[in-house]
Amino acid sequence: MAGTPETLYARDGDAHLAYQIVGDGGPDLLFVPPSPFPIDLLWDEPTVAGHLHRLASFSRLILTDLLGSGSSDAVPIHDRPAMQTWTDGLVAVLDAVGSKCASVFAWSESGLPVMLLTASHPHRVRSLVLCSPFARFLRASDQPFGMPESALVKYVDSFEHTVGTGAMVDLLAPSWAGDAAKRGAGGRAVSGSPAALDISRRCTTCSCAPTSAPRWRASRRRRCCCTGVATATCVANTRRISQEDPARTTGGARRRRQHVVRDADRVLDEVESFLTGQRSATPSNRVLSTVLFTDIVGSTQRAAQLGDEAWTTALAAHNRVVERHVAGARGVIVKFTGDGALATFDGPARAINCACAIRDAVEDLGLEIRAGLHTGEVEMADGDVHGIAVHIAARIMALAGPGEILVSGVIPPLVLGSRIAFTDSGIHELKGVPDRWPVLAVQDTRG
């Protein structure tokens, strides 16, 4: 059996993402292991290496380390928006290997950025396989299956005392606890210092898949041979897996998590059948996106003061500012609304930073804006966007005061790890939108 494949690097801005390519036996398959298990060391354990070669027998297997782990750049991930950064890195790897559309196989906490990738870049993901995933690790009032916060603290702290030892294997793979060779290999495979792993675990356990993600439908569900819950492989229809399914599969604190599948050949049979079969996905124009609405404050009065000609000139300058900053944030201007703009982004942190930049830049034009943002599923058609997420962003903008940037409560968990801070602006009823919505204001750091 061949040894460890060559590790190559993709670039995302100033960051380097480690990846490997094995096999050429079929369609592209991107495999993303959990952050503590780097791709360079996975090959040291013969059983795991055999499973990887099995995947490569029916695919062009692409393995990658998430940014901040393994052989990828050890950036201070806690200073960046973790979910967006990880997802950007996956896109960079796909670009580097020339993959326009790949199947994706994620394991444990790596399911979080992979689910976000699938929802925000559906044209890049052909199909999705999740093993022991979770949409949210921490228990919440609307997600009682998660781990209680008190138990989570003990769980994360335990990593400091088990890094690099067989005790890590006992924790993550109880079925290997009696195998000295596997305990040794598993302990060596866990990469990173206790501090680095602590940061990684806290980011993944405190992040969550957005509750407004597409309503992904499971095409097949089989009972997991290692945990007894419906997930060993959450084999799913392209772009659409039920958001509830990944969440339920953790079992929260009620079950002992088993990160290594004992009957792996049976699971790989299902994966191969799913990835190489002829099941076709229903085409969809729905995508997870961050929607930004901006509005010039007091535009009518300002137009009356300046006169039609001067106002037209000022509005054109405003539009150029918006175009420049949206393009720089990898966003798309959907349309100008007369005295504002509607734009979409594939990452909420970029959208927030863009809104702040626009607000600051138009002050030089003697203008003042307000902005509202929400992340949710939108329908893209004929150069426009539709859906409840668009209405929510518009209603939130209407609550904003001059110079204020407001976001829905969905957004803060998605920018965990960034330096963006928020203040509570209360719970609001949004006209025409069901339920009551938490709204937060982006803290102004201009001094």
Image (spheres, rainbow, N blue to C red):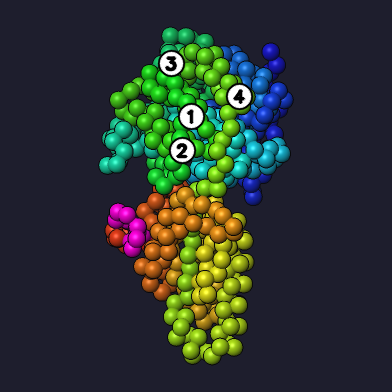
Is tag 1's residue or tag 3's residue first in the polypeptide sequence?
1
Tell me the CA gap for discs 3 and 4: 22 Å
What residue type is disc 2 on? Trp
Q: Residue at x 35, y 27 (%)?
A: 251
Q: Which residue is mark 2?
A: 216
Whether residue 138 appears in this view of the structure is yes
Is tag 3's residue or tag 4's residue first in the polypeptide sequence?
3
Q: Residue at x 38, y 18 (%)?
A: 228
Badge 1: residue crowd in 10 Å (few <14, some 14–19, many ≥20): some
Give the x, y percent position of residue 150. 28, 35
Give the x, y percent position of residue 292. 49, 61
| Label 3 secondary element | loop
What residue type is disc 1 on? Ser
Instruction: Tell me the tag on residue 161.
Output: none
Give the x, y percent position of residue 81. 49, 49
Is tag 4's residue or tag 1's residue first in the polypeptide sequence?
1
> Hey, which quadrant is residue 127 in on the image?
top right
Badge 4: residue crowd in 10 Å (few <14, some 14–19, many ≥20): few
The segment highlighted magenta reads: 430-440
Q: Which residue is mark 3?
A: 225
Is tag 3's residue or tag 2's residue first in the polypeptide sequence?
2
Q: Which residue is mark 1?
A: 219
Q: Residue at x 58, y 32 (%)?
A: 280
